[in-house]
Image: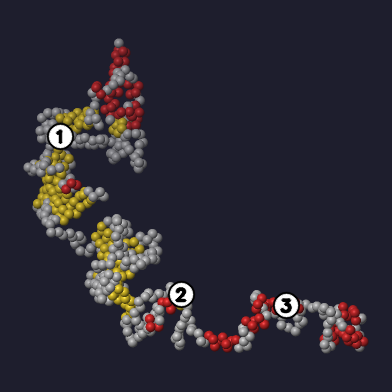
Amino acid sequence: MTRSRDLANFADSTEFTAADNTKLDGIEASATADQTNAEIKTAVQAGADIALGGNPTTTTQSAGNNTTRLATTAFTQAAITALVDSSPASLNTLNELAAALGDDANFSTTVTNSIATKLPLAGGAMTGAITTNSTFDGRDVAADGVLATNALPKSGGTMTGTLGVSTAANNYVTVTATNNNTRAGYLSSSKKSDGTVVKTWIRSEEGGIGSIFTETNHNLGFATNNAAPQMTLSTSGNLGIGTTAPESEMHLTKSTSGGRGGTLTIENSNSSVLNNEVQIALLTDSGASVGGTANARIKAINTNAGNGAADITFTTWNGSAEGERLRITSGGNVGINTAAPAATLHIKTGTNENFRMSSDSSVRIQAMNDAGDTINTMKIGGSPLIFLGSGGTERMRIDSSGNLSLMTDGADLKLYYTEPRTFITNSGASVTIKQIDNNASNAFIDYSSWTNSSLMRIMNTGEIKVHHTGTLMTVLNPAQFQIKASNLKNGMKVEVSNTNYVCYGSNTSVAANYYFAYMSNSSNAQIGSIYCTTSSVAYNTSSDYRLKENVDYTWDATTRLKQLKPARFNFIVDDTNTLVDGFLAHEAQAVVPECATGTHNEVDNDGNAVMQGIDQSKLVPLLVKTIQELEARITALEA
């Protein structure tokens, strides 16, 4: 191994001096074998005072390195630059800093002693006189003449100028009372007109209560924006808002022209909770309380958490319990003694007396429309009880005896009861409806004239008798509907707009012919009748030639007649199965349409059968015409 090769592998490669080379030569000469780099490094490190010539270099350590490694010029310059940082050029050396401190080696002690002679920022007592040849807080003290004799003493006094307090944060004036004096301090001012002094006190009361009050019978006002008092507490204890002369304990006023005046607002801001409420509690004795039992309350209760709908309730104390007496719902219903009024006015009570009105003369209950017109009126005042229609016209009255009178178009329709009869009378038409006899077996209702002549009677058996009260005939007696026509020809007249009416009647004293039944159409033209004579009855249908047109006498009856299907049958309802002769309605209807009513296999909306009927008299023209045709044929054959 040569020295040049070993030095090439030396980690801390440097340029050695002649003395170093001599030492290295000595080391190499004494070497007994090839030595490693580590062995050579150890031998070098063991040598003392190794001097490096030329411009040897090494690795620059990171800032803040505090080991025994070599510090390069770059490392040293970086440390000095960090120490100086951004100091101005006149203070970036130690000499410049020392000069700035007055080259005072005890600078800290000097500064401490100097501060000790100054007045603290928090204030304190000055031990000497304060003099100035300039201004003090912007004021020329000498020019103003504010000498010590003009200053406000610590013991107090009257200031002739304005006291100003800075509006900066946490600035305030503190007035401290001593010797248990509850009046902590007061402010006083003079009226501009007469110079009267008004003292306004700010003081603390016993029990930790702070108060503001005036002396010498003066009101206490509160205002904003340097305006006249907007709220006034009078000497009598009345509080006025919007007025300086409150007339009651709480007086709100606001001058408007058709708008909202003084308003008292009571709010529960959490309106989304069902049954939230605000209230006014009325306490009339010392035992009542807002949180306990009040003598009366007015509440607004949230009944819908979604839209804020609310009811208003009124509660009172009845001597044993506080309870709701009246409620106005969000929908406008008013309930008295009920929390769920089901109508515009709903009164509920457990006694017989539900509603009472009183007056020195008469009381009126009126129904009016939105325009203010009176529709109906009930007039209550002594006797009778009167009901008035529009325009004040009397329509009904109930007198002290309980008789009911209905007034219509000048005629009095009266309902009254006299044992054992109940009467409904109409004085204009002289007609009376009355119940005769309260006995169930004898009672009937009689419709009679004012002279007590019976016009119609409804019996307790359900019979209806017209113009008679006895028995008309023995056959089919009693009849459900009986008419006695007296000397009238026409015993009954029935005017109907549809069919399916059946009548039964008799008259034992007919002196001439008469119509028992008379049927007409919508034009009042006769279409049929039941006509009675002294010996017979005729069942007529309209047949006058003046009602007909397109009259034809030449048509083939025999062919159509042969299409009819006469049959024998019995009716299902007949348990005896008795055979009868006749036709099936729909079969005869196919040949002579007018002989049958209804439609074949017809049913109603519920699926029930609607039965057909047949008028066999309508087949007579066909039979007569067929006989005439056969007679003509027979005559022709006989000839």
In x, y percent, where is residue 436? 11, 48
Residue 311 visible at all: yes
| Of pointers 1 and 3, the one earlier in the residue sequence | 3
- Seen in the picture, residue 420 relative to 210 is either above or below; the reply is above
User: Tag 2: Cα neighbours inside 10 Å, few (<14), some, or many (≥20)?
Assistant: few
Q: Which residue is mark 2?
A: 138
Kind of residue at disc 2? Gly
Q: CA distance from mark 1 to mark 3?
A: 148 Å
Front: mark 1 or 2: 2
Q: Residue at x 31, y 31 (%)?
A: 596
The residue furthest left is 451
The quarter in which the C terminus is drawn is top left
Disc 2 and disc 3 in contact, CB within 8 angstroms? no
Front: mark 2 or 3: 2
The quarter in which the N terminus is drawn is bottom right
Q: Residue at x 35, y 78 (%)?
A: 159
Give the image quarter of residue 218. bottom left
Relative placement, left or right, of 386 versus 292 is left
Q: Residue at x 69, y 77 (%)?
A: 81
Q: CA distance from mark 1 to mark 2?
A: 129 Å
Q: Residue at x 29, y 58 (%)?
A: 333
Q: Which residue is mark 1?
A: 491
